[in-house]
Image (cartoon, rainbow, N blue to C red):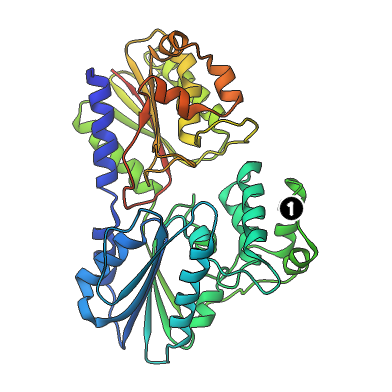
Amino acid sequence: MNKLHRDAQAIIQRSIEANLPGAAVRTALAGHTFQGEIYLVAIGKAAWTMAKAAHEELGDRIRKGVVITKYDHSKGPIPNMEIVEAGHPLSDENTLRGTQLAIDLAKSLGEKDELLFLISGGGSALFELPQPGVTLDDIVDINSQLLASGADIVEINMIRKRLSSVKAGRFAQIAAPAKVFTVVLSDVLGDRLDSIASGPAAPDLSTVADAKRVVEKYNLKINDTMKKLLEQETPKSADNVETVITGSVSTLCRSAAEIAKELGYTPYILTSNLNCEAREAGRMAASLAAQINNGPHSFQAPCALILGGETVVHIKGKGKGGRNQELALAAAEGIAGRCDVVIFSLGSDGTDGPTDAAGGIVDGNTVAKLAEKGLDIQKVLDDNDSYHALKAIDGLIVTGPTGTNVNDIAVILHQ
């Protein structure tokens, strides 16, 4: 492994470590005074980590809790809490079971009780109980359509929340008259509370007209029951809720910049709001690399160009991959033959699409290595099969579940 790859690995590992939710949860709790009995509900990919930190801080003051997280994201029992692992990115029967447990807990609360509600990315899929007349199969089908359409997370959640009994502020209503103290690890660009986990404790900013536009834009197939629900307006207030955002993609980018600087690179955060096709973002990353050292007004090496956000993929092929792997692979052609550049992209939660990889990393040798394996980048991209291509040349980034989820980060390292 050369210096560029070693530095890339250091940025990956240390920036994720700097954004683990434990310390952020403890900071949020230190600034809050609980008046009554404390109960807990944690949802999302970082739910276990957040709940564990809360227990370490509050101990047996938490009378009872429900933790709903993705399969293989729990690291053991937590006192006084029931832990449910469920499906992501598509809800399953365990999702419904865990959500019902959370609803039962919320319904049992009185005016003097307080619910500590911990939210992280993935909460939309992991926290779900469909509206009456809507089935789990309906939810899975519409989510599959949305995920394959190229819709962004705000658009996806506009539809999800209208078909749900707990999204769009409805869970906060269920918990009333108890107060709800919400601690959020944001995976939504702009930290829009009504879109993070589809806003179960936040007033909804979107309208019926917005939801209809999403259905028309992506030609979504919905049944009559869904159509009627999309005509109903969602809650526009959540008076019993106090919310603190503990982390986001902006903090992830800043961490990567600090680490890159320590390693001898001049860091530039180009954006923390990357929101486009993964393939186009990859090509843009390669074009940015080509402009480094290109005259007095360009970036000068050694430097690290950092892009945070979340791209999308229009799935047309039958392969396996994720947006970060596709971004990295799409960047490879533009840096072919160069020994001074490495480009990587990864999801901070350690999971990129339906794979065990967090993302991908490419350099000037990637195209040649693929050719030796009989693989053509364009054909791979057309089949959305970035996972198998990168795996064949040891180009996958595999971290395992990280315990955090604050969007994605792509870095162009130039020495």
Residue 78 in which image quadrant: bottom left
Residue positioned 55% across, 54% down in the render: 90
Q: Is residue 332 above or below residue 94?
A: above
Residue positioned 78% across, 68% down in the render: 228
Residue positioned 37% across, 83% down in the render: 114
Residue type, numbered disc 1: Val
Q: Quadrant of the N terminus?
A: top left
**324 or 239, which lies in front?**
324
Q: Is residue 90 above or below residue 272?
A: below
Most distant residue in the front direction: 93
| Number of callouts | 1
In the picture, measured across the screen, residue 397 lies left or right of residue 11, that is right
Residue 47 visible to an observer of this rendering: yes
The kind of secondary structure element at disc 1 is helix
Residue at mark 1: 215
Residue 312 in which image quadrant: top right
Q: Quadrant of the C terminus?
A: top left
Residue 53 horizontal/vertical position (percent): 25, 65
Residue 363 horizontal/vertical position (percent): 37, 17
**105 or 252, which lies in front?**
105
In the picture, measured across the screen, residue 352 lies left or right of residue 116, that is right
Residue 230 horizontal/vertical position (percent): 73, 65
Count neighbours of disc 1 (C-alpha within 10 A) and say few if under 14, some if 14 to 19, many if 20 or more.
Answer: some
**85 or 279, which lies in front?**
85
Most distant residue in the bottom direction: 111
Q: Is residue 255 above or below residue 210?
A: above
Residue 127 visible to an observer of this rendering: no
Residue 374 horizontal/vertical position (percent): 49, 11
In the picture, measured across the screen, residue 396 lies left or right of residue 32, that is right
